[in-house]
Amino acid sequence: MKTLAEDQWRPRAQAFERRADALTADRRERVARGQGHAVDDFLYEYYPTRPSLLRRWHPGVGVSLEGAHDHAGWRWYRSDAGVTSVDAVAFCEARGATVDFVTGLVAATLTRRAALGCFGLHEWAMVYRDRDTRHALPLRLGAEGTDQVVASHDVVCTHFDAYRFFTEDAVPRNAHALSRETQSQMEQPGCLHATMDLFKWCSKLAPAVPSELTLDAFELAVEVRRLDMAASPYDVSGLGLEALRIETPDGKRDYAARQREFSTRGEVLRRRLLDACDAIRREASEAADARTGA
């Protein structure tokens, strides 16, 4: 267990808070005005999270803080003689199954090559032959044009949490019959939603993972989400995004190139997340042994 004096950890926490505030400024301003954003609000509402949680700094397991009075009152922390740290034992007792699931899913994903041939058609399959769209935005090609794009392409989605929103007519068009049970077998690093989900897994493991990792995952997820919607069937021009026309050869090349870039960046985060999961289990085991005198 590494112990940090207050003058060591406080500047780090303050720098983190400034970074988090900069990343969430638009969201906070929209909420204050009572406005929504069909692209950027997704990360806050689907996962879900709040700017106030994103700016809360956690060192992760294995680090103790002197003078951390706020941390002492937060869930999953324990204090002893003025030194505060994440209680890895209590965390694993309550969230051990989540640690195991995330470890298995992320490790399996890392063993696979990125598949770059889906071209973002999951969003198109969610409105295929259905006039009730999921977002209050017009369809860029209209309903019939959107259906034609889906009908003229192979749909090869590998992400269950996108697939489960496919329309009834789109489900049999997918190359894979996906389920929650097969998620770890199908997840692959080229998938935009799998990369966005890295933020979800970090959030579920807070405060046991370092907050810098969580915010790095959030920042990447923001970029990925914007590509996700730029390549979607929706007209996002009114939201400051330029359409990526995946129905064209140039659009397909651009999409695959961006997928490859995000996959590379996501690999770094996946390895850091696995290291964090290993640290949680290791710290919990060592702390439990110490408490029992083993």
Image: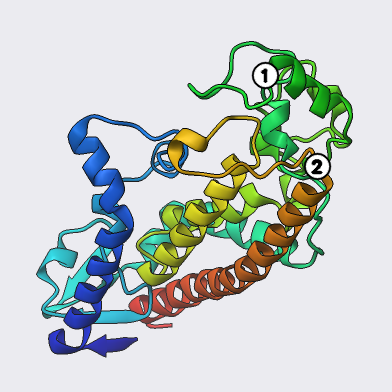
Q: Which mark is residue 70?
A: none
Q: How many marks?
A: 2
Give the x, y percent position of residue 223: 52, 56
Q: Which quadrant holds residue 212?
A: bottom left
Q: Which quadrant holds residue 142?
A: top right
Task: Identify the residue shown where x is 72% and y is 67%.
Answer: 110
Task: Identify the residue shown where x is 58% and y is 18%.
Answer: 133
Give the x, y percent position of residue 62: 37, 80
Task: Identify the residue shown where x is 19% and y is 74%.
Answer: 14
| Mark 2: amino acid | Thr
Pick whichever of labels 1 and 2 is earlier in the sequence.
1
| Mark 1: amino acid | Gly
Horizontal side of 176 relative to 278 (left or right) equals right
Label 1 vs label 2: CA separation?
A: 16 Å
Picture quarter with the C terminus: bottom left
Q: Which mark is residue 142?
A: 1
State the residue position of label 2. Answer: 248
In the image, residue 225 above or below residue 85: above
> Element under label 2?
loop
> Label 2 neighbourhood size at 10 Å, few (<14), some (14-19), many (20+)?
few
